[in-house]
Amino acid sequence: FSSPILRARTTAEVIAEANGAPLQMDARLQERDMGDWDGLWFDEIQRNHAELFAQWKADPTAFVPPGGESLYDLRDRLQQALAEWLEAYRGQTIAVVCHVGPLRVAICEALGLPLTRHRLLTIENAAPTRINYGRHQNNLVYFNRI
Protein backbone atom coordinates (compact mmCIF):
# COMPACT_ATOMS: atom_id res chain seq x y z
CA PHE A 1 0.00 0.00 0.00
CA SER A 2 1.22 3.49 -0.74
CA SER A 3 0.30 7.10 -0.44
CA PRO A 4 -0.56 8.33 -3.94
CA ILE A 5 1.87 11.26 -3.54
CA LEU A 6 4.68 10.89 -6.08
CA ARG A 7 7.63 10.59 -3.67
CA ALA A 8 5.95 7.72 -1.80
CA ARG A 9 4.49 6.10 -4.91
CA THR A 10 7.91 6.00 -6.61
CA THR A 11 9.44 4.20 -3.64
CA ALA A 12 6.48 1.83 -3.39
CA GLU A 13 6.73 0.93 -7.08
CA VAL A 14 10.35 -0.16 -6.62
CA ILE A 15 9.45 -2.27 -3.57
CA ALA A 16 6.43 -3.85 -5.26
CA GLU A 17 8.36 -4.71 -8.42
CA ALA A 18 11.29 -6.20 -6.48
CA ASN A 19 8.89 -8.42 -4.52
CA GLY A 20 6.47 -9.26 -7.33
CA ALA A 21 3.68 -7.79 -5.24
CA PRO A 22 0.64 -5.78 -6.31
CA LEU A 23 0.59 -2.11 -5.41
CA GLN A 24 -2.47 -0.29 -4.14
CA MET A 25 -2.69 3.46 -3.62
CA ASP A 26 -4.57 4.69 -0.57
CA ALA A 27 -5.16 8.38 0.11
CA ARG A 28 -5.46 7.64 3.84
CA LEU A 29 -1.65 7.32 3.85
CA GLN A 30 -1.11 10.94 2.83
CA GLU A 31 0.52 13.46 5.11
CA ARG A 32 -1.59 15.59 7.43
CA ASP A 33 -3.81 17.97 5.45
CA MET A 34 -2.60 21.45 6.33
CA GLY A 35 -5.41 23.06 4.33
CA ASP A 36 -4.77 26.70 3.45
CA TRP A 37 -1.28 26.40 4.93
CA ASP A 38 -0.17 23.66 2.54
CA GLY A 39 2.97 24.72 0.70
CA LEU A 40 3.64 27.73 2.94
CA TRP A 41 6.86 28.24 4.91
CA PHE A 42 6.61 28.36 8.71
CA ASP A 43 7.96 31.92 8.84
CA GLU A 44 5.32 32.98 6.32
CA ILE A 45 2.55 31.41 8.42
CA GLN A 46 3.94 33.01 11.57
CA ARG A 47 4.14 36.42 9.91
CA ASN A 48 0.72 36.36 8.23
CA HIS A 49 -1.28 34.30 10.75
CA ALA A 50 0.46 35.03 14.07
CA GLU A 51 -2.48 34.15 16.33
CA LEU A 52 -3.25 30.87 14.57
CA PHE A 53 0.45 30.03 14.42
CA ALA A 54 0.70 30.50 18.20
CA GLN A 55 -2.29 28.19 18.70
CA TRP A 56 -0.66 25.57 16.49
CA LYS A 57 2.64 25.79 18.36
CA ALA A 58 0.81 25.54 21.70
CA ASP A 59 -1.07 22.36 20.71
CA PRO A 60 0.10 20.95 17.36
CA THR A 61 -1.78 17.71 17.89
CA ALA A 62 -5.31 19.09 18.23
CA PHE A 63 -4.93 22.28 16.18
CA VAL A 64 -6.80 22.33 12.87
CA PRO A 65 -5.29 24.69 10.30
CA PRO A 66 -7.86 26.55 8.17
CA GLY A 67 -9.31 24.02 5.72
CA GLY A 68 -7.12 21.23 7.11
CA GLU A 69 -7.16 18.48 9.69
CA SER A 70 -5.82 17.81 13.17
CA LEU A 71 -3.33 15.09 13.92
CA TYR A 72 -6.23 13.24 15.55
CA ASP A 73 -8.03 13.32 12.19
CA LEU A 74 -4.94 11.84 10.53
CA ARG A 75 -4.86 9.16 13.25
CA ASP A 76 -8.51 8.28 12.68
CA ARG A 77 -8.12 7.77 8.93
CA LEU A 78 -4.90 5.81 9.41
CA GLN A 79 -6.47 3.57 12.07
CA GLN A 80 -9.35 2.83 9.71
CA ALA A 81 -6.94 1.77 6.98
CA LEU A 82 -4.80 -0.34 9.33
CA ALA A 83 -7.86 -2.10 10.77
CA GLU A 84 -9.01 -3.03 7.26
CA TRP A 85 -5.58 -4.33 6.25
CA LEU A 86 -4.98 -6.26 9.47
CA GLU A 87 -8.29 -8.04 8.97
CA ALA A 88 -7.82 -8.70 5.25
CA TYR A 89 -4.16 -9.79 5.52
CA ARG A 90 -4.13 -11.48 8.92
CA GLY A 91 -0.91 -13.48 9.38
CA GLN A 92 0.68 -11.98 6.27
CA THR A 93 3.33 -9.34 5.75
CA ILE A 94 2.36 -6.13 4.01
CA ALA A 95 4.44 -3.11 3.09
CA VAL A 96 3.13 0.39 3.62
CA VAL A 97 4.89 3.39 2.09
CA CYS A 98 3.85 6.73 3.53
CA HIS A 99 5.17 9.97 5.00
CA VAL A 100 6.61 11.15 8.32
CA GLY A 101 3.29 12.17 9.90
CA PRO A 102 1.41 8.92 9.31
CA LEU A 103 4.46 6.87 10.35
CA ARG A 104 4.86 8.82 13.59
CA VAL A 105 1.16 8.32 14.31
CA ALA A 106 1.35 4.58 13.51
CA ILE A 107 4.28 4.11 15.88
CA CYS A 108 2.61 6.07 18.70
CA GLU A 109 -0.60 4.11 18.29
CA ALA A 110 1.14 0.73 18.01
CA LEU A 111 3.14 1.34 21.19
CA GLY A 112 0.38 3.03 23.15
CA LEU A 113 2.22 6.35 23.30
CA PRO A 114 0.23 9.58 23.58
CA LEU A 115 -0.09 11.23 20.20
CA THR A 116 1.25 14.41 21.78
CA ARG A 117 4.67 12.67 21.85
CA HIS A 118 4.82 12.15 18.07
CA ARG A 119 7.46 14.82 17.48
CA LEU A 120 9.95 12.91 19.62
CA LEU A 121 10.24 10.43 16.75
CA THR A 122 12.81 11.46 14.16
CA ILE A 123 12.07 9.69 10.90
CA GLU A 124 14.79 9.41 8.27
CA ASN A 125 13.86 9.52 4.60
CA ALA A 126 13.28 6.06 3.09
CA ALA A 127 14.41 4.30 6.30
CA PRO A 128 12.25 1.22 6.92
CA THR A 129 10.34 0.68 10.13
CA ARG A 130 8.71 -2.64 10.99
CA ILE A 131 5.76 -3.03 13.32
CA ASN A 132 4.30 -6.43 14.13
CA TYR A 133 0.64 -6.13 15.09
CA GLY A 134 -0.57 -8.81 17.48
CA ARG A 135 -3.94 -9.61 18.97
CA HIS A 136 -2.87 -8.48 22.43
CA GLN A 137 0.39 -6.61 21.88
CA ASN A 138 2.22 -4.79 19.12
CA ASN A 139 5.98 -4.89 18.64
CA LEU A 140 8.24 -2.26 17.11
CA VAL A 141 10.76 -4.65 15.53
CA TYR A 142 12.97 -1.96 14.04
CA PHE A 143 12.86 1.76 13.47
CA ASN A 144 14.77 3.93 10.98
CA ARG A 145 16.77 0.97 9.69
CA ILE A 146 19.20 2.12 7.03
Image (tube, helix red, strand yellow):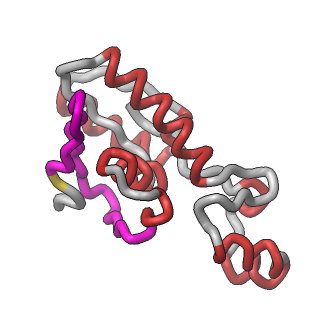
Is 32 left or right of 141, judged from the image as shown?
A: right
The image shows residue 48, relative to residue 120, as above or below, that is below
Residue 6 colored in magenta in the image: no
Taking depth in this image into account, of 138 and 91 the one nearest to the observer is 138
Q: Please identify the quarter of the rendering in which residue 49 is found.
A: bottom right
Magenta segment boundaries in residue numbering: 119-141
Q: Position of residue 48 (x, y in %)?
A: 84, 79
Which residue is located at x 58 percent, y 53 percent?
71
Q: Position of residue 77 (x, y in %)?
A: 55, 36
Which residue is located at x 81 percent, y 81 percent?
50
Is 107 left or right of 7, judged from the image as shown?
A: left
The image shows residue 129, relative to residue 37, as above or below, that is above
User: Farthest residue in the front direction?
Assistant: 136
Taking depth in this image into account, of 38 and 101 the one nearest to the observer is 101
Q: Position of residue 125 (x, y in %)?
A: 34, 61
Which residue is located at x 32 percent, y 45 percent?
110
The image shows residue 37, relative to residue 83, as above or below, that is below
The image shows residue 39, relative to residue 131, as above or below, that is below
Q: Position of residue 35 (x, y in %)?
A: 74, 54
